[in-house]
Image (tube, rainbow, N blue to C red):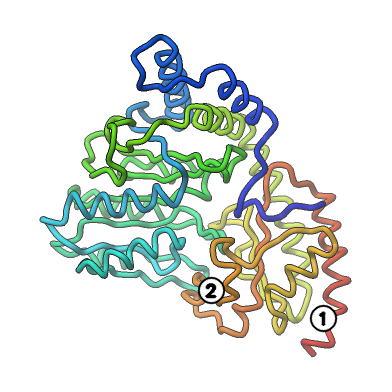
Amino acid sequence: MIYFDNSATTQISPDVLATYNTVSKKIWGNPSSLHNFGETAWNLLEQARTQIANLLGVKPGEIIFTSGGSEGDNWVIKGTAMTKHRFGKHIITTSVEHAAVRNAMEQLEQLGFEVTYLPVDKEGRIDPADVKAAIRPDTILVSIMAVNNEVGTIQPIKEVGEILKDYPNIHYMVDAVQAVGKGIDDIVFSDRVDFAVFSGHKFHAPRGTGFVYVRAGRQIEPLIAGGGQERTMRSGTENTPGDVALSRAIRLVKENESQTVKNEQTIKERIYDHLAQFDHVEIFSGRNDGFAPHVLCFAIVGVRGETIVHAFEEKDIFISTTSACSSKKHSEAGTLAAMKVPENVATSAVRISLGDQNTLEEADQFNKVFDELYAGFKKIIE
């Protein structure tokens, strides 16, 4: 089996699973309990928090554990709205955000908030000047993803941060779900970013784990009220084994990050260069600069994306139709529509997303299978 769908989810690593199982079996106490067993669980949880903070160069108190990316996105967006609605109801985001951001924005619009959706260029990238032009006296939040999940575009997070230094009262959120282990921490953690959202299952941690970086001093209402866990920011009994395993996963990712980035980039370029030779293939991801090393989106024009996915699946190669969160809807990819890709082309789009376990041999096998499938598709597209 060749698994090229790592942006959808990754396999939990054996070491991380072992950590999860050990904590589940030996330290199942509630971290909020006063007895020593609870204290042991609390100490372990705080060690995990500190490890993540140290790896990312932030303060332990700025790491709040969540259940993943969708919760984190919703919390920052809606929590900001609850905190700052008296000062304004205008939000700025992009036209290429993940559904967790886009749908949360649409919910707020139903409550009277106004959202500006910034356009993108042919590579799926916003112009920082458009952010500045969109800012109003009542703007309370700017939300921009670090890496696009469909085509891999890296957004100008740092440049937007420079603009927002002149607007210190506006919250600045980055959806960093696709950015972990891709060599771009200096972009995600620029000194103007207030919130950054992460999801554990994108980097070999258990599903249902994640965290949000909340810059010290920034006020935000909790999305989940209750017993006051996570410094009152996210109530609910902590997922101690999951959060400890999450910290182990991110440590392992950071240890091998430079080699992983180099490997993923080499594999991507091997496949990219092969696909670029075919007349009926359109590639939407850039080959290298300005794009993440692990995402490659392309289309065999005239063949439905789901047809391509299933054809590869029959050869034991697993890819996806753009975002996993919307792939079963058989609809045009939102990012490609924003990039002005014609609908008949966008509906042919598929995505390869690489991980640290992938090899050049798998890339060569993919290219070989692609040649076979393309030959079979020619009677459809010519």
Q: Quadrant of residue 201?
A: top right
Which residue is denoted by mark 2 in the rendering?
336
Q: Is residue 138 above or below residue 205?
A: below
**Where residue 250 sits: x, y (%)?**
55, 33
Picture residue at 15% right of the left edge, 62% below the top: 138
**Where residue 242 sits: x, y (%)?**
52, 32
Q: Is residue 85 above or below residue 198?
A: below
Q: Nearer the viewer, residue 307 or 269?
A: 307
Q: Callout 2, which amino acid?
A: Leu
Q: Callout 1, which amino acid?
A: Phe
Q: Earlier in the sequence, mark 1 or mark 2?
A: 2
Picture residue at 64% right of the left edge, 66% below the top: 297
Q: Nearer the viewer, residue 290 or 110?
A: 110
Q: Nearer the viewer, residue 140 or 67?
A: 67
Which residue is denoted by mark 1 in the rendering?
377
**Where residue 329 sits: x, y (%)?**
57, 72
Q: Residues within 10 Å of mark 1 (few under 14, many from 20)?
A: some
Is 359 on the left-hand or right-hand side of 329?
right
Q: Quadrant of residue 95?
A: bottom left
Is 29 on the left-hand or right-hand side of 190?
right
Q: Residues within 10 Å of mark 2 (few under 14, many from 20)?
A: many
Picture residue at 45% right of the left edge, 42% below the top: 67
Element carrying mark 2 = helix
Picture residue at 58% right of the left edge, 37% below the top: 205
Are the residues flagged by discs 1 and 2 in contact, CB closer than 8 Å?
A: no
Element carrying mark 1 = helix
